[in-house]
Image (cartoon, rainbow, N blue to C red):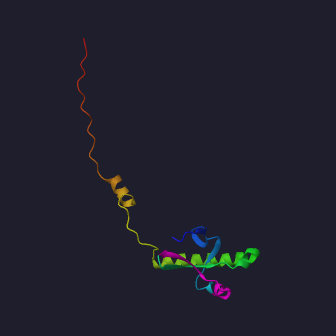
Amino acid sequence: MFGGVGIYADDAMFALVADDIIYLKADEKNAPAFDREGLAPFTYSRKPGRQAVMSYRRMPDRLYDDPDELARWASDALAAAIRKQASTAKSGARKRKTRPNPKSSPQSKSKKLHEKRPAKRPKKRQPRLTKQ
């Protein structure tokens, strides 16, 4: 992963913090505002010599002193995150394909619960010897 902290509103990650820098979610609708400010996308090292580029852009420094404009930029970033979620859900795309762990998958647990187990036989009791 990128080694930062995600900032969420409900289930939508609209910002992240990495190395004490805030990055806001960008897409085709709000990217021009970041371009006008000359703000590059967030990148991180994946493997030696390989950089991953995320769809988050550095927040303009001037927004730290202007809470009203910061709210507008954050709102636009949240809208971008929601659009991304909607397009991902619509296309049926998933972030990652993972192989299920057969020991912890819900299917294996439900199979175990519904498997027919042999009925337990009551233990045969030995006759009790008593002194008379």
At 69% across and 79% down in the image, what residue appears? Answer: 60
Q: Report the quarter where the C terminus lies.
A: top left
Q: Nearer the viewer, residue 90 or 47?
A: 47
Occupied quadrant, residue 5: bottom right
Point out the stretch of residues depicted in magenta: 32-47
Residue extending farthest top: 132
- Left or right of residue 110: residue 58: right
Q: Toward the viewer: 61 or 47?
A: 47
Q: Quadrant of residue 96?
A: bottom left
Residue at the front extreme of this rendering: 48
Q: Is residue 53 left or right of residue 115?
A: right
Question: Is residue 92 shown above or below 130?
Answer: below
- Where does residue 120 sit, x and y in percent of width and height? 28, 41
For image coordinates 63% across by 77% down, the residue present is 77
Q: Residue at x 58, y 86 (%)?
A: 28
Q: Can you say whether 8 is above or below 38 in the image?
A: above
